[in-house]
Amino acid sequence: MGFSLQLDDFGTGNASLDLLKNFPFSTVKIDSSFTKEAANKPETRAIIKAITLLSKELSFDIVIEGVETVQQQSFAREYGIKVAQGSTMLKRCR
């Protein structure tokens, strides 16, 4: 039995690039604030894409938070993000 560390709310506050190189994280969780803005702001989509590419290069798993619409779910898939959290996920579980 083991454990893994997840870096939550990446891209906000103290969740910085410095943490990625100094701690043995296995997962990066993209904050829901990015997910909410992705549909309307190309710069936000570019940031999500960059986080995704960096995470893959460092062999981290990726979780995107705040997936509330089918459009957001499609966006996550487009960038190869396989794990999402949000209300669209709840409907599948029921």
Image (cartoon, rainbow, N blue to C red):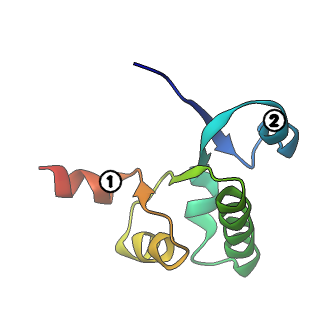
Q: Residue 83, position in %: x, y?
A: 42, 55
The residue type indicated by label 2 comes to Leu
Relative to 94, does residue 48 appear above or below in the rendering? below
* Residue sitting at x 38%, y 68%: 69
* Residue nearest the observer in this picture, 91 or 19: 19
Q: Mark 1 or mark 2: name the one nearer the start of the chain.
A: 2
Q: Which mark is residue 19?
A: 2
Disc 1 vs disc 2: which is toward the camera? 2
Are the residues flagged by discs 1 and 2 in contact, CB closer than 8 Å?
no
Residue lying furthest right:
18
* Residue sitting at x 56%, y 62%: 36
Q: Secondary structure at mark 2?
A: helix
Q: Give the labeled residue for mark 1.
A: 87
* Residue sitting at x 45%, y 73%: 77
Q: Residues within 10 Å of mark 2 (few under 14, many from 20)?
A: few
* Residue sitting at x 70%, y 32%: 24
Image quadrant in which you'd find residue 18: top right
Q: Secondary structure at mark 1?
A: helix
Position of 68 with respect to 12 (left or right) is left
* Residue nearest the observer in this picture, 30 or 53: 53
Q: CA distance from mark 1 to mark 2?
A: 29 Å
Q: Residue 52, position in %: x, y?
A: 65, 64
Relative to 37, does residue 25 appear above or below in the rendering? above
* Residue nearest the observer in this picture, 22 or 49: 22
Position of 64 with respect to 1 (left or right) is right
